[in-house]
């Protein structure tokens, strides 16, 4: 039997070339599909700014979650620090303010990443640390649990100052500067609360202010507390709340009302506010 080696070699080469050509075409098709899905995802986010994972899964025709996150990673994505991180956007879409924050439809994103990372950065770069109420106001989300976790993991220090827990930098020099600045708020506050009177003791000054507050109605107390907080600036809400025996959120509301000129002089509370009226019942004879 005569074997034609040249014929076998030629046939083998043709098979290899055909297989290689098929693989190249297949790889090109896969790359085109990948690029198409990336473009589809990017176009959707550019139109809508933000999206949940389920929305992105629908856009890509129901792939698994790993595929979605792989696409997001290639597009340089961000997850929200509000809403438990359930919203996503792209770095190219977010327009961060001077503090590194951006929001869309009340969903908040940070250039620093998660809520834990953002809270840590805000505390470390602050002049006098933050209380949980102050940081919640700055970040527009609840921050108490994030701050407690940062404190438990020794990433931030916590100290009770003037009756309020304050979170400070874990770095010793920065901690000392922040604590000193926080303590100075007390003396600065009393100077703004009263007309300058060098003969008036600190306790007497506080007594005069509290006596004055007792003559005001609910709305007037809230607005006055907001005014004093505005005078203090940073950290004012929590300090005035502690000094006046009020809730920090009430002080913050009074401050916001003053800033917006938003209050009704004809009523003390918003419609529906206050206790429900009790109907007196007559005993049956």
Image (tube, rainbow, N blue to C red):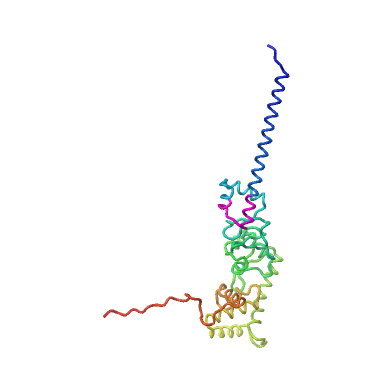
Query: Taken as a whole, is the magenta stretch helix, strand or loop?
Result: helix
Where residue 116 appears, as percent x and y from the top left, is 62, 59
Q: How many marks?
A: 0
Q: Is residue 56 above or below residue 196?
A: above
Q: Residue at coordinates 69% horizontally, 63% vertically from top-left?
A: 171
Q: Residue at coordinates 63% horizontally, 66% vertically from top-left?
A: 167
Where residue 79 appears, as percent x and y from the top left, is 62, 56
Where residue 260 appears, as percent x and y from the top left, is 61, 76
Q: Quadrant of the N terminus?
A: top right
Magenta part of the chain: 40-56
Q: Is residue 278 above or below residue 208?
A: above
Magenta stretch: residue 18 in it?
A: no
Residue lying at the far top of the rendered structure: 1
Residue 219 falls left or right of residue 97: left
Where residue 272 appears, as percent x and y from the top left, is 47, 75
Which quadrant would residue 93 be assigned to in this image?
bottom right
Q: Is residue 274 above or below residue 124?
A: below
Which quadrant would residue 206 be assigned to in this image?
bottom right
Q: Quadrant of the C terminus?
A: bottom left
Q: Is residue 153 above or below residue 133?
A: above
């Amino acid at each position: 039997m005569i074997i034609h080696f040249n014929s076998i070699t030629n046939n083998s080469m043709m098979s290899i070339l055909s297989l290689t050509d098929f693989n190249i075409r297949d790889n090109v098709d896969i790359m085109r599909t990948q690029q198409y899905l990336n473009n589809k995802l990017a176009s959707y986010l550019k139109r809508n700014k933000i999206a949940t994972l389920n929305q992105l899964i629908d856009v890509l025709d129901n792939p698994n979650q790993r595929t979605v996150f792989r696409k997001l990673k290639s597009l340089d994505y961000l997850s929200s620090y509000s809403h438990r991180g359930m919203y996503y956007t792209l770095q190219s879409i977010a327009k961060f303010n001077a503090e590194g924050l951006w929001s869309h439809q009340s969903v908040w994103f940070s250039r620093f990443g998660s809520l834990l990372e953002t809270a840590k950065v805000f505390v470390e770069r602050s002049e006098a640390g933050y209380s949980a109420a102050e940081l919640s106001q700055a970040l527009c989300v609840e921050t108490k649990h994030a701050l407690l976790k940062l404190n438990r993991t020794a990433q931030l220090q916590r100290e009770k100052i003037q009756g309020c827990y304050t979170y400070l930098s874990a770095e010793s020099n920065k901690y000392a500067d922040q604590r000193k600045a926080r303590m100075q708020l007390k003396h600065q506050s009393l100077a703004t609360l009263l007309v300058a009177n060098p003969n008036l003791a600190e306790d007497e000054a506080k007594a005069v202010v509290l006596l004055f507050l007792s003559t005001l109605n609910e709305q007037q107390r809230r607005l006055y507390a907001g005014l004093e907080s505005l005078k203090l600036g940073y950290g004012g809400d929590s300090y005035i709340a502690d000094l006046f025996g009020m809730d920090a959120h009430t002080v913050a509301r009074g401050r916001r009302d003053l800033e917006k000129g938003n209050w009704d002089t004809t009523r003390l509370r918003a419609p529906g506010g206050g206790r429900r009226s009790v109907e007196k019942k007559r005993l049956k004879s």
